Image: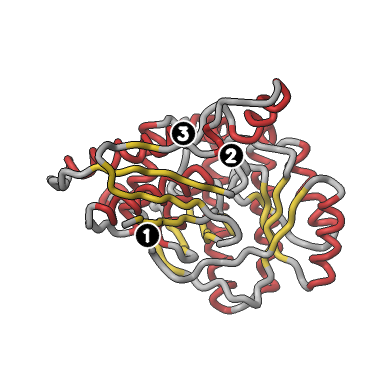
Amino acid sequence: MIIKSVAYPRAALIGNPSDGYNGKTIAFVFRNYRAEVQLYETPELELLSSRRDYNSFKSLDALSEDIAQYGYYGGIRLMKAAAKKFNEYCHASGIVLEKKNFTLKYYSDIPNRLGLAGSSAIITAAMKAMFRFYELEIDPAHLANLVLSTERDELGIPAGLQDRVAQAYNIPVFMDFDKEFMRENGIGRYTPIDIPAELKIYVAYRTDLAEGSEILHSRLRDDYESGVPRVVAAMQEWAHLTEQVKIALEKKDFAAIPALLDRNFDLRCEVCSGSVSAKNRRMVEIARSCGASAKFTGSGGAIIGTYSDDTMFENMRKAFKAEHIDLLKPDIVCEGNI
């Protein structure tokens, strides 16, 4: 029997990057792209490579382009780390696994290194597949913790819980990472939230840019833990913006949302100006010049916002296309954990 497990890219509607700093966020996953893992029983445990793991190139230019898109490390390290963490979780939980092995392979068409949580999608899909293979269960909140631990502790990737929570729950979630609550419970307060179809949301990303989130989070972490006043104040404001968007969604007061999204990005520029590149800033400028709101979906490379009608959307598409930016209407996943 072949077990198939899927995880989707994440878009942070509001609140990022406060998720790693006891803030509040709203995020969802969307099925326009996906990471899929296939797992089946075999005599030995084997992890199969995919496109981003290839080490044969037609030329030096091809090698350079591959590194620009995927970085120096591929997806095999993600699956290795996931398998190791899964095994450690079972040992720590007193779970005795059945003596059987598997082959694990993955596929992903999620645009890489563009703030859409493509790496955590691969790990999440792999984790879900292994739990199914050994007929085990884990609730979404603790699955998110396990995925975060895989990235942060095993791979040294600075990250917050937001991406993993959205991918584990598979439904739009309001997340409150209150410090005291997390210290007592080990998880945040996670509340499913409805994002009505009447709210017109777009996602856009550059096809000529790929960046990791490491630099941004390393700087923010140092400043936050040092208690730098402007950083602490920014985290509090991002949390407040998230609460306001939650209220607006519940009341279907869609007119209030664009200004809140715009403020999320503007505050980021105030606090993290050195981490906002010219190409990233340009995406936001183009969207706003067309009348749309705009902010990052994650740490850069992709943006999210609202637009008023199809005419505005088409104007954005034309403006973006001229600067190597793809535009889409996210197909938001609302079916719950799978």
Label 2 vs label 1: CA separation?
Answer: 25 Å
| Residue hosting label 1 | 189
Which amino acid type is shown beneath numbered disc 3?
A: Ile
Residue 174 at what x, y percent from top left?
Answer: 47, 63
Asked if the residue under mark 1 is in contact with the one under mark 2, i.e. CB atoms within 8 Å, the reply is no
Are the residues at dot 3 and dot 2 in contact (C-beta closer than 8 Å)? no
Q: Residue at x 54, y 53 (%)?
A: 9
In-image side of 55 versus 158 (left or right) = right
Going 41% across and 66% down the picture, which residue do you hit? Answer: 191
Residue 71 place in picture, x, y as percent: 58, 30
Question: What's the colour scheme?
Answer: secondary structure
Q: Find the distance from the CA under tag 3 to the CA under tag 2.
A: 25 Å
Residue 286 falls left or right of residue 71: right
Quadrant the N terminus occupies: bottom left
- Quarter placement of the C terminus: bottom left
Of the two numbered discs 3 and 2 in the rendering, the one whose residue sits closer to the viewer? 3
Q: Can the viewer see residue 21?
A: no
The residue tagged with tag 3: helix, strand or loop? loop
The answer to whether residue 204 is visible is: yes
Identify which residue, 172 or 191, lies in the foreground: 172
Pointer 2 local density, CA inside 10 Å: few below 14, some 14–19, many at least 20: few
Instruction: Indicate the quadrant where residue 154 lies.
Output: top left
Specify the quadrant of the image occupied by residue 76: top left
Give the residue pinned by disc 2: 230
Query: 225 or 118: nearer the eye?
Result: 118
Name the element at disc 1.
Answer: strand
Type of the residue with mark 1: Arg
Which is closer to the viewer, label 3 or label 1? 3
The tag on residue 157 is: 3
